Amino acid sequence: MSKLQSMQSAYMGRFAPSPTGPLHFGSLLTAVASYCDAKSQQGTWLVRIEDTDIPRIYPDSETHILHCLDAFEFEPDAEIIFQKDRLEIYEEVIYQLQQLNLVYACQCTRKMLGSNAIYAGTCRDLNLAFEHQAIRVRVNDQLICFEDRLQGQHCSNLAHDLGDFVLKRRDGIINYQLAVVVDDYLQGMTHIVRGADLLDNTERQIWLGQLLDYPRLQYMHLPLAMNAQGQKLSKQNLAQALDPAQAPQLLQQAIRALHQLPVDLDRPARMLQQAVAQWDVSRIPRTTQLEQIYQ
């Protein structure tokens, strides 16, 4: 048993940013909500940097993430892990799935697939060698449902909505879906708090967890902060990077955006302490988008 699993409490949560750009206000909402939700239940809160997509890593963004964690005075309960240091673990899990005939090699290129979002299973029965090919996991024709703590029941039939999906790309990059499921298990996660833009990923992750015999997690998908153009705040939409020098003011704004009781402007650690004491999930809007406009 790992050190993390041995220290597992009834609640184990995490904040898992990807360094494809600097943290923005939407990232802060997730950090605040995941931290307060864990700490209000005497839980453990960890930070994981999801950096398997190495070509998309934005210069200095990991440094910015770590600087922000310090400036906002978030204190993870264990050492921060970086997924790019764990690639062998993910490869072992792919091998495990291969032995069970739950994955297969796929030679389809994006050009071959075209605009079709649902994979037709072209390579499913070709028994291609795994080297230098994408690796897909087989899905079944069945409905997968979960009860989200904010969004209510959410369901998907992966065979109809997506098809067999990629765990490892042809260029060798480990897909987000695999890395997140494996690490949530190995880190002993029980509760996932993240943005509603990841809602549609959840059934894939539940399916993969079932194949690997991992325990089912509890999910809470937060309403997204939107910009004036009606787009979610994101690195792709050039959301403004968090300014560590403005940490108390931004923290106060994030707590307000989550419809929590106001906290006094103070050093961030004290503000977080007050936010934890007042944390009330029932106050968070049960929508996928916040009404107010953010930058």
Image (spheres, grey):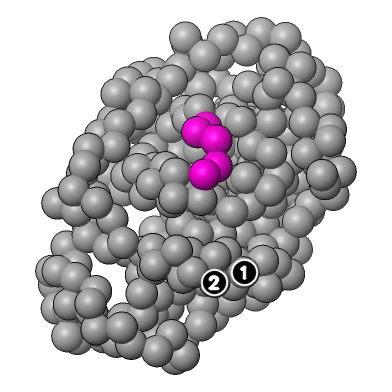
**Range of magenta residues:** 213-217
Residue located beneath label 2 in the image: 95
Write down the quadrant of residue 142 in the picture: top left
- Foreground residue, 73 or 42? 42
Q: Horizontally, is 14 left or right of 132 in the view?
A: right
Q: Tell me the amino acid under the disc marked 1.
A: Glu
* Image quarter (top left, top right, bottom left or bottom right) of the N terminus: top right
Q: Horizontally, is 125 left or right of 83 in the view?
A: left
Q: Residue at x 48, y 46 (%)?
A: 209
Residue located beneath label 1 in the image: 92
Q: Main secondary structure of the magenta part?
A: loop
Q: Residue at x 70, y 21 (%)?
A: 10
Q: Horizontally, is 135 left or right of 139 in the view?
A: right
Q: Horizontally, is 13 left or right of 208 in the view?
A: right
Write down the quadrant of residue 293 in the picture: top left
Residue at the limit of the structure toward the front, as seen here: 100
Image position, residue 128 (x, y; %): 33, 87
Compared with 53, 164 (above or below) is: above
Image position, residue 219 (x, y; %): 47, 30
Which element type, helix, strand or loop, lies under badge 2? helix
Contact between marks 2 and 1 (CB within 8 A): the answer is yes
Image position, residue 36 (x, y; %): 67, 23
